[in-house]
Amino acid sequence: MTTSKATPFLKSAVIIASVVLAVCTCFVSAGCQSQSKTVRVGVRTDVPGMSSMDTQTGEFSGYEIDLANELFRRIYSNDVNVVFIGVSGDTRESMLDNGSIDALIACYTITDDRQEKYNISQPYHTASAKIMVNRSSGYASVSDLDGRTIGVLENSTSAAALQEYAQSKGVTVFPNEYETYLQIKDSLSNDLIAGFCTDDVILAGYLDDDTVLLPDSFAQQQYGIATRKDDTELAASIDDVLAVMESDGTIATLEQKWASSSS
């Protein structure tokens, strides 16, 4: 019997084909770890205790950061890379609209108008609006702010809530919008405005020895996670996992952790 001269070539071809197949299989296999899901989350950079960014390291921390990490870890069974992207009151919706972020977790109050534009989850936090003033001002309530200018965040619900509450007390105030909370606090510190109005949990991160919160509390706000209307699967997953995190005590534990750190 003679041996074909093509045999070595065929053996080499089989070996090469086997290697190529193994490489291709790796790329599509769940066992290859390079295909983890990336979720881009829009968050605030200037709300200590909720979501703030260290300007030196670029790292984010706060209740909403921990909430997002745990939420998406559960949704994607640990196989996820959560990327945090800073947003402002002016940019948060446009960044969601244009696809720069996949979800918005940024002290975003649930309103009827917003629910018409986006999928918004069940609430993960409830806050109330309050007013911060300089201790040296002597202001004791909203009644002392008649005719005064109060700083609020642009495109937020604070301006309307403040005016409605002030009118109920027979007082007229003038909301002045700012791009960031830091800008409002600086204006208050320099006596350019009489007060700083937003949700209590946000003001807690800016309270210092020179400022106090007025006893007035109004306009209860609930925060939700926003996604685009066409991201129905993601929205459903967020709601399902938030419900579990609520029932198993995770949300309460995270809230307590960051409330303690801010006190």
Image (cartoon, rainbow, N blue to C red):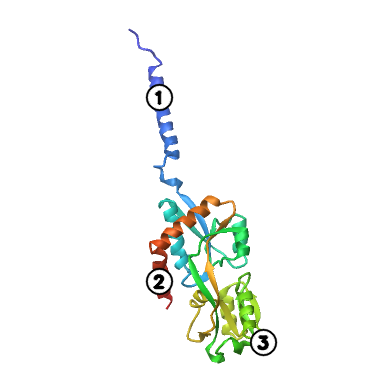
Q: Which mark is residue 147?
A: 3
Q: Which residue is mark 2?
A: 256
Q: Mark 2 vs mark 3: which is more N-terminal?
A: 3
User: Quick check: 146 above or below 109?
Assistant: below
Is residue 37 left or right of 112 when viewed as pictured?
left
Q: Mark 1 vs mark 2: which is more N-terminal?
A: 1
Amino acid tagged 2: Gln
Q: Quadrant of residue 137?
A: bottom right
Amino acid tagged 1: Val
Local SS, label 3: loop
Local SS, label 2: helix
Mark 3 → mark 1, Cα distance in angstroms:
86 Å
Q: Which mark is residue 14?
A: 1
Q: Position of residue 225 (x, y in %)?
A: 52, 61
Amino acid tagged 3: Gly
Image quadrant where one finds the C terminus: bottom left
Given residues 132 and 87, the one toward you in this image is 132
User: Quick check: 86 above or below 10?
Assistant: below
- Which numbered mark, 1 or 2, is in the foreground of this view? 2
Q: Residue at x 53, y 68 (%)?
A: 222
Image quadrant where one finds the N terminus: top left
- Which numbered mark, 3 or 1, is in the foreground of this view? 3
Q: Mark 3 vs mark 1: which is more N-terminal?
A: 1
Instruction: Classify 10 Å Cα crowding around label 1: few (below 14), some (14-19), many (20 and above).
Output: few
Mark 2 → mark 3, Cα distance in angstroms:
38 Å
Given residues 75 and 11, the one toward you in this image is 75
